[in-house]
Amino acid sequence: MKRIIIYLFLICAVITNIYLIFVWKPPGKVVEQQKITKDVISYSKSVYKVDKEKILERLSSDDKRDFDKIINRLSAFDIGKIKEYYKDSNDEEGVVNIFKLLKRRLTAEDYRRIYEISSSFVEFDNIKGEIKKIRLL
């Protein structure tokens, strides 16, 4: 008797699955959700004084050497985060995040040197006081 009940249950389950897979059609249309993207449009001045892609070309050899020496003191993870912030579509937020990270990871002297080097290609006046707050800390 126990076997008969199990077989009946299995047969019902198989028939139900076959019906659901091959015969049943859900009511209504399937609506595909479209991914909506949002472009960031900045109506303010650019954060960079020069083209973002040509920054390293415009640095003097002494500045490049100092910049490389200081950046090489950071961990690979920190360098990866800086690259991620640099590629951010919101330039202002990216620059602020970069300098927050540098302030936490570098000595005061190294941070000041990076700030001096960066002032030749970053317009710190256009940033809403965030960098100035970090610099004073």
Image (cartoon, rainbow, N blue to C red):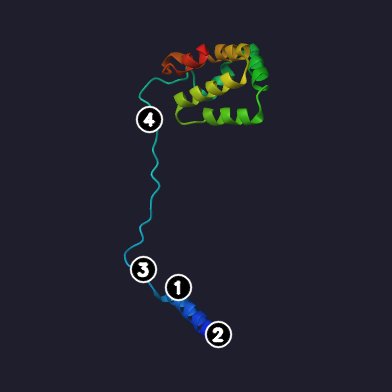
In primary-sequence order, the first of circles 3 and 4 is: 3
Q: Position of residue 35 (x, y in %)?
A: 40, 47
Would residue 121 appear left or right of 41 to someone viewing this image? Answer: right
- Give the vertical position of 41 relative to 36 (above or below): above
Q: Nearer the viewer, mark 3 or mark 4?
A: 3
Q: Which residue is under mark 2?
A: 2
Seen at 39% across and 73% down, the residue is 24
Q: Which residue is under mark 3?
A: 26
Q: Marks 3 and 1: in contact by CB < 8 Å?
A: no
Q: Which residue is under mark 1?
A: 21
The answer for how far apart the CA atoms under marks 2 and 4 are is 70 Å
The answer for how far apart the CA atoms under marks 3 and 4 are is 42 Å
Q: Which residue is under mark 4?
A: 41
The answer for how far apart the CA atoms under marks 2 and 1 are is 29 Å
Q: Position of residue 95 (x, y in %)?
A: 50, 23
- Under circle 2, the secondary element is helix
Q: Position of residue 136 (x, y in %)?
A: 51, 11
Q: Marks 2 and 3: in contact by CB < 8 Å?
A: no
